[in-house]
Image (cartoon, rainbow, N blue to C red):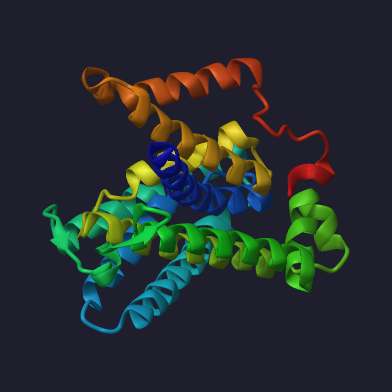
Amino acid sequence: MTTTFQTIIDAASFGGLYALLGLGIALIFGVMRMINFAHGEFITAGAYTLFFVSGVPLLAMVALAIIAVMTLAVATERIAFRPVRDAPPSTLLMTSFAVSFFLQSLAIMIFGTRAKGVDVAGGLLSSVDIAGLSVSKLTLVTIATTIALMIGVGAVLTRTSLGVEIRAAAEDFDMARLLGIRGDRVIAAAFAMSGTLAAVAAVLLVAQGGTVTPTMGLTPVLIAFVATIIGGMGRLGGAVLGGFVLGTLTVVLQEVLPLEMRPYRDALVYTAVIVVLVFRPQGIIGVRSVEDRL
């Protein structure tokens, strides 16, 4: 029973973090129909911000990281993506790759390739006892943070005028502009929200690993992309569900596989993803109509 509870908590932690990553990708895809592979570099930027401001109170570190990544995300949209917004999807995709490689190379030039140590977790590395089960405070913070952010994003999209505009733009961008919605404002807002999610993800990842590298965003953006695909492209709920499915599968396989098979865990995870897509190529939550995209 204790092992089962531990697995559930770990699955909620991993799944929540993966859902957070997928949500950042899905926000941009919902509005621009573009996979933003530079999202991984937004995470890296947030991590290096934490490195620069280490030593200040934790809440100040998180706030500064969010501000820095939001600014970078909005600036990237304005400089790199806005000029090619009306280009074919292949051009947007190549631009996304170009921005990703540029930011990654810039980080290597400035900081080098060696990992930098950052102490973010502090007292969060200790454990608390819950019904006889020892649970890391960082795990609980990760679960609470991801749940709060997902509720917050949902509230913004459903209960604010800006959220309604984002959903309208996701449904039909050209028609939304004809009806008076400012496309530049909506897309900039989507990038700002995506940047916020990337910054929080950076805080959680650095707290877990304790180091920062120029390429640390590569694995998270791959996870985010896979979560978005298996959940259903263009649906925020699908990205969240995909993230939880991916995280739960990872934790369960880590628990049930024999020791000699655990190095192959990720291969088995992505094999399962392929199986899902064979039977559900549209994702677990398929987009049935234009109105279902968000």
Please count the marks in the image: 0
Q: Which residue is at 39% across, 51% downward?
A: 40
- Is 294 positioned to the left or the right of 66 in the image? right
- The spot of residue 44 in percent (x, y) is 32, 58
Q: Return the residue nearer the eye: 7 or 226.
A: 7
Q: Which residue is at 86% across, 61% downward?
A: 178
Q: Return the residue nearer the eye: 230 or 263.
A: 263
- Using the rendered image of the protein, determine whether residue 120 is visible from the camera's viewpoint: no
Q: Return the residue nearer the eye: 58 or 28.
A: 58
- Is 184 positioned to the left or the right of 175 in the image? left
Query: Is residue 157 placed above or below 254 in the rendered structure?
Result: below
- Using the rendered image of the protein, determine whether residue 87 is visible from the camera's viewpoint: yes
Query: Is residue 174 placed above or below 284 in the rendered structure?
Result: below
Query: Is residue 259 placed above or below 75 in the rendered structure?
Result: above
Query: Is residue 230 placed above or below 175 in the rendered structure?
Result: above
Q: Return the residue nearer the eye: 39 or 246.
A: 246
- The spot of residue 14 in percent (x, y) is 43, 46
Q: Which residue is at 54% across, 35% downward?
A: 245
Position of the N terminus, as image quadrant, is top left
Q: Which residue is at 83% across, 45% downward?
A: 291
Q: Quadrant of residue 276?
A: top right
- The spot of residue 35 in percent (x, y) is 54, 43
- Is 77 positioned to the left or the right of 258 in the image? right
- The spot of residue 279 in percent (x, y) is 64, 16
- Outermost residue, right side: 179
- Is 41 positioned to the left or the right of 163 in the image? left
